[in-house]
Amino acid sequence: MTLTLDRQPSARQAQERRVFSFSPGPAVLPLPVLREVQRDLLALPGAGGSVLEISHRSPAFDAILAEAEANLRELLAVPADYRVFFLQGGASLQFSMVPINLLRGQGLPATYILTGTWGGKAAMEARREGRVHVVWDDADGAYARVPSAAELDLPEASSYVHYTSNETIQGVQFRRPPEVGDSPLVCDASSEFLSRPVDVGKFGLLYACAQKNAGPAGLTVVVVSDEVLERCGDDLHSMLSYRRHAEKGSRLNTPNVFGVYVFLLMTRWLRDEVGGLEAASARAKAKTGLIYDALDADGGEFYVPHAEVASRSRMNVTFRLRTSELEPAFVAAAAERDLVALKGHRSVGGFRASLYNAMPMEGAERLRDFMLDFRATH
């Protein structure tokens, strides 16, 4: 594929034609946010330069960082005894940072609940730092569901208990956090972050990459309690130490200035235009509900959902066709209607429709209508 940066058709014409992208990430951003980025890109108001050019120690970025954190605290009702970090490296770096800080030298194993690919990758990295106890793993069931409380036989004490609240690839989601007793609960919330309210006080540490619901790729948000922060070792490599990041207020090195700026705009959009996380949750349920209704309309004769009903994600709808030979035709016909990035992950196959915060209802309706038409035609 060759990337061309010429201006034929015109920039305005190219801007006017936007497809509905159901990519699992980087994902679609809201048009009001993109327009504000476009408007301010040459000169951020009051800064005298682009947000791509300002110093991470400038007054302009001081204000961006402060409001980004304040908005996040307001949206999630983050308690005062929790720290917020804006880091880099994606959720994948957190797969290592969590055990480096919370497992190394603790004397207790870390407990992992595996409901899909990303939880498995997190556990693999944790094993490099210490003992890992896998309390539940649905690999034999193709990760089609999350466990019930009765299925989680948790040890009395763990360095921490880790789970992935929404598995992007398999399309399964916890409706509520697991009860883990006195052990710190650690959550990879990447693909549902800021899509619904959560009780932050139930977690010792919560982390998420931004490029699904909250901004562009390259930014990772970590929310950690002071109690858990005190458990972190003080002899770690600086860039891997939560303590060092806490000391430097997310500026241990040059942060992703642009990513934090777009995150700030996303939090404003969620608060002011969506109406907060309760409203975001209702939107998510309505959008994915349209697609699940289309999947279920004929009882699985044409479309076959991957996830069991009680565990279905409200972010990532995964399915395949009963007649797999039709899958290339499905992708091609969808693209003709400007519905793109629907192919499922290679480990699951089939299709995946990711309907994150910024996917408009129109996109879900267009996909639903196409799916019904495709079934009728074939």
Image (cartoon, rainbow, N blue to C red):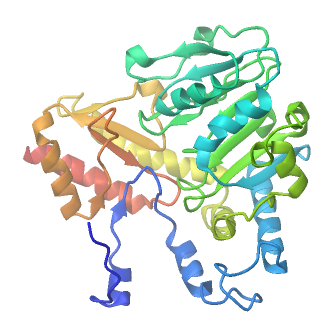
Residue 43 seen in the figure:
yes
Lateral position of residue 253 relative to residue 299, left or right: right
Q: Residue at x 43, y 49 (%)?
A: 24
Image quadrant assignment for residue 326: top left
Image quadrant assignment for residue 360: bottom left
Residue 199 seen in the figure:
no
**Where does the image place residue 96, in percent across and percent down from the top left?**
66, 36
**Where does the image place residue 290, in percent across and percent down from the top left?**
37, 46
Lateral position of residue 224 relative to residue 89, left or right: right
Most extreme residue toward the left is 378
Image quadrant assignment for residue 199: top right
Q: Residue at x 59, y 58 (%)?
A: 218
User: Residue 95 or 310: which is nearer the viewer?
Assistant: 95
Q: Residue at x 29, y 33 (%)?
A: 296
Query: Looking at the image, is 377 positioned above or below residue 295?
Result: below
Q: How many marks?
A: 0
Locate the C terminus and report the quarter of the image it occupies.
top left
Query: Looking at the image, is 284 positioned above or below residue 118?
Result: below
Query: Looking at the image, is 105 positioned above or below residue 357?
Result: above
Lateral position of residue 304 relative to residue 206, left or right: left
User: Residue 57 or 277: which is nearer the viewer?
Assistant: 57
Q: Residue at x 38, y 21 (%)?
A: 142
Lateral position of residue 329 relative to residue 233, left or right: left
Locate the N terminus and report the quarter of the image it occupies.
bottom left
**Where does the image place residue 265, in percent across and percent down from the top left?**
65, 69
**Where does the image place residue 83, in percent across and percent down from the top left?**
84, 48
Query: Looking at the image, is 128 positioned above or below residue 167?
Result: above
